[in-house]
Image (spheres, rainbow, N blue to C red):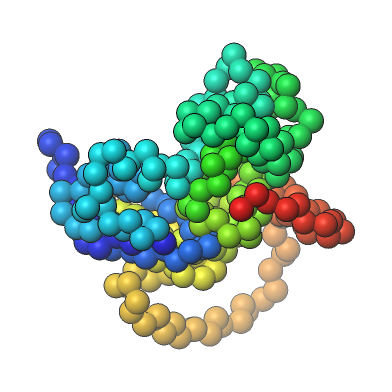
């Protein structure tokens, strides 16, 4: 579905390349987290996929389209196949929820009849069927992000890129957005999420690709976790064998010690506990009949 082969991008006056011989393959229907510090190259990689930027070297293929042979007039067609959700929503404030979603279809020439069939289904998918006539200013941050996702999904893209989708949300709404993206992934859409949200990444245990100074330094295929510094796993070349760790026995203390005072939870632990509770409550609910998507 997404293939990058030794892709490099250089910007004038930068000390290091924005992307440095990046190679990766994301299969259809995968759910992938892309993580890294600011300036690691995440935004540049996304701009490569949406053809906002061109690589200086290397090959990019998305959905069978070879970017080397793409003409300028074909770029709008490519972008209809890739949905993008941003941290700041980018909604039209003077249009209703229904009109914001419909607008994404109007600009590509979809008929009014098809818009009337599609928009209610997409709003139902994101849980906002009752907010069709509301304006963005009347919605919570989580609801506005759901509208942004609905707008991106209205054109039924095969790939959905979410760029920091939980960056402006509280933990409860963050978890709701991630669960929505997971549901969309279950319908067959490939999902690529860039994020700094360590807790979300560690709870979902999906594939995690880590960028640093324009290079992929880690690609955890299954059960990945957020680890920018390599503190939880020993840094090694991609695909290399895992290190063998030999445990050292700890000698027993000479005398029993008084029980230590229970350490108060940090704010980060509180947030993680809240997200785990939300996840447990969500999974404890009876399985409802799955909504039929519009693929």
Q: Is residue 20 visible?
A: no
Q: How many marks?
A: 0
Which residue shows up at 46% across the image and 70% down it? 221
Question: Residue 190's x, y, as percent?
Answer: 51, 57
The answer to which quarter of the image holds residue 53 is top left
The quarter of the picture where the N terminus appears is: bottom left
Residue 220, placed above or below residue 136: below
Question: Residue 149's x, y, as percent?
Answer: 58, 39
In this view of the protein, which residue sits in the foreground, 74 or 211? 74
In this view of the protein, which residue sits in the foreground, 203 or 160? 160
Question: Residue 130's x, y, as percent?
Answer: 79, 30
Which residue is outermost to the top?
A: 94
Q: Is residue 202 left or right of residue 14?
A: right
The answer to which quarter of the image holds residue 144 is top right
Q: Is residue 287 left or right of residue 181?
A: right
Which residue shows up at 29% across the image and 38% down it? 73
Residue 5, placed above or below residue 128: below
Question: Residue 178's x, y, as percent?
Answer: 62, 49
The answer to which quarter of the image holds residue 15 is top left
Q: Is residue 253 visible?
A: yes
In this view of the protein, which residue sits in the foreground, 68 or 15? 68
Q: Is residue 180 left or right of residue 83?
A: right
Which residue shows up at 48% across the image and 64% down it? 28
Which residue is outermost to the left?
A: 13
Which residue shows up at 57% across the image and 32% down it? 111
Residue 152, placed above or below residue 193: above
Q: Is residue 123 left or right of residue 10?
A: right
């Amino acid at each position: 579905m997404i293939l990058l082969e030794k892709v490099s991008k250089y910007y004038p006056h930068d000390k290091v390349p924005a992307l440095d011989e990046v190679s990766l393959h994301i299969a259809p229907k995968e759910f992938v987290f892309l993580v890294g510090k600011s300036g690691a190259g995440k935004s540049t990689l996304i701009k490569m996929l949406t053809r906002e930027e061109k690589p200086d070297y290397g090959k990019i293929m998305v959905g069978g389209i070879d970017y080397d042979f793409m003409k300028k007039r074909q770029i709008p067609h490519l972008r209809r196949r890739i949905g993008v959700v941003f941290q700041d929503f980018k909604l039209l404030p003077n249009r209703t929820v229904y009109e914001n979603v419909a607008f994404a279809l109007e600009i590509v020439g979809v008929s009014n009849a098809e818009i009337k069939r599609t928009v209610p289904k997409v709003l139902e998918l994101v849980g906002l069927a009752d907010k069709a006539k509301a304006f963005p200013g009347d919605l919570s941050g989580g609801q506005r992000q759901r509208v942004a996702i609905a707008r991106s999904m209205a054109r039924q893209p095969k790939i959905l890129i979410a760029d920091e989708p939980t960056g402006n949300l509280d933990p409860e709404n963050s978890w709701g957005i991630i669960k929505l993206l997971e549901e969309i992934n279950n319908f067959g859409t490939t999902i690529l999420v860039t994020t700094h949200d360590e807790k979300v990444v560690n709870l979902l245990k999906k594939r995690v690709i880590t960028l640093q100074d324009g290079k992929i330094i880690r690609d955890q295929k299954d059960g990945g976790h957020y680890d920018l510094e390599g503190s939880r796993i020993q840094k090694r070349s991609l695909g290399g064998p895992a290190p063998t760790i030999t445990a050292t026995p700890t000698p027993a203390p000479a005398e029993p010690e008084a029980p230590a005072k229970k350490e108060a939870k940090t704010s980060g632990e509180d947030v993680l506990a809240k997200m785990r509770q939300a996840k447990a409550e969500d999974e404890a609910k009876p399985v409802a009949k799955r909504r039929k998507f519009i693929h």
